[in-house]
Image (spheres, grey):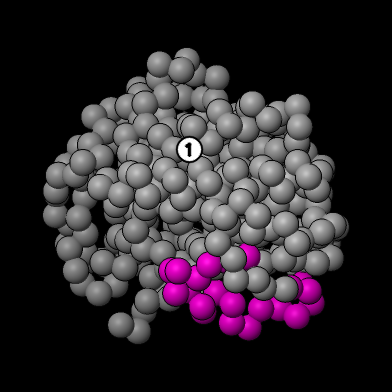
Amino acid sequence: MNLLITGCCGHIGSYVAQNVHKIKKIKKTILVDNIKSNRFCSLFNLKKKSNFKFYLRDVDKLNSLNDFKNIDYVIHCASMTNAEKSFGKEKQMYKNNIDCLKTVIKFCKKNKAKLFHLSSTSVYGKQTDLVDENCEKKYLKPQSPYADIKLIEERMLIKERKNLRYNTFRFGTIAGISKGIRFHTAVNKFCLNAAINENIYVYKTALNQYRPYLSLKDAFKTFKFCIEKDFFNNDVYNILSGNFTVNQILKKIRKHKKNIKVKLVKTEIMNQLSYHVSKKKIQMKGLNLNQDIENDIKDTLKLLGNI
């Protein structure tokens, strides 16, 4: 079986590439990225036994994947992802991300490849109590252009459900280290600020609000599970390791870095309500996601330990 990873140099894509040898069904992996992020380090010292080939491509161009053959699975990570900085870049982000998915859908239909589509739990927006994949549409209230695009992408795939096999995974906020690690999401950003003795900026309304978080280890476990079990049923699943408040995340950081400085700030993404995201639906399929986010925090602080 052969795998194609778009956006292979990113936070998630690079972690999958580094660990893909653990999925015994995968014999060859095609890596695609435009490297506009300059994360060339994601390509350094990849394991030879994984049988990689890298191609420099812009996936937003409709025919950019046409020359690839005999691909069984596609993990689609190629997109602009910074939710907070998507304000002011709406047009660019909408065009790029939607065009990328159009390219991937076209490729998967033509080659009968099974697709991993990555959405986000941020599509739930303002919500109370516990939310799951079956919540009413009126409760899907994305608070950023990035999250709004994810809902558009989900609807694009629903229209194609007769023509391809896929899973849409609504990922929680990613935590953990990879070659393509980024520091714009909560856990990683907090760890970086703590490591360099800078203020940890926290949204005023968020300190005691629950949000879903996902360890990179659990993200990879999800891909591995689906490939090994041939689990693709054209549905939406929440994928998270656990729900935590920002305060709980800060307490985990303090266990390993005691003197951290926290400063409350305002932001355009100002969710007023707290909510838990349910992972029961994917658990009922036999996938248990239970990585301890504190281990990701410890690993990230250790990575930055000498500064």
Report crowding for label 1: few under 14, some 14 to 19, many 20 or more residues within 10 A (C-alpha): many
Residue at figure coordinates x 41%, y 64% from the top left = 182
Q: At 29% from the left edge and 72% from the top edge, which residue is drawn?
A: 195
Q: Tell me where residue 7 appears, x and y as whole percent.
A: 56, 61
| Quadrant occupied by the N terminus | bottom right
- Above-or-below relation of 55 to 188: below
Residue 304 position by quadrant: bottom left
Q: Which residue is mark 1?
A: 150
Q: Which residues are magenta?
A: 32-52
Q: Amino acid at mark 1?
A: Lys
Residue situated in front as seen by the camera: 179 or 193: 179
Quick check: 93 above or below 209? below
Q: Position of residue 26 (x, y in %)?
A: 81, 61
Is residue 46 on the magenta stretch? yes
Q: Is residue 165 visible?
A: yes
Q: Is residue 17 visible?
A: no
State left or right for residue 66 relative to residue 216: right
Q: Nearer the viewer, residue 59 or 28?
A: 59
**For the residue labelled by badge 1, is the local secondary structure a helix, a strand or a loop?**
helix
Closer to the camera in the image, 252 or 27: 27
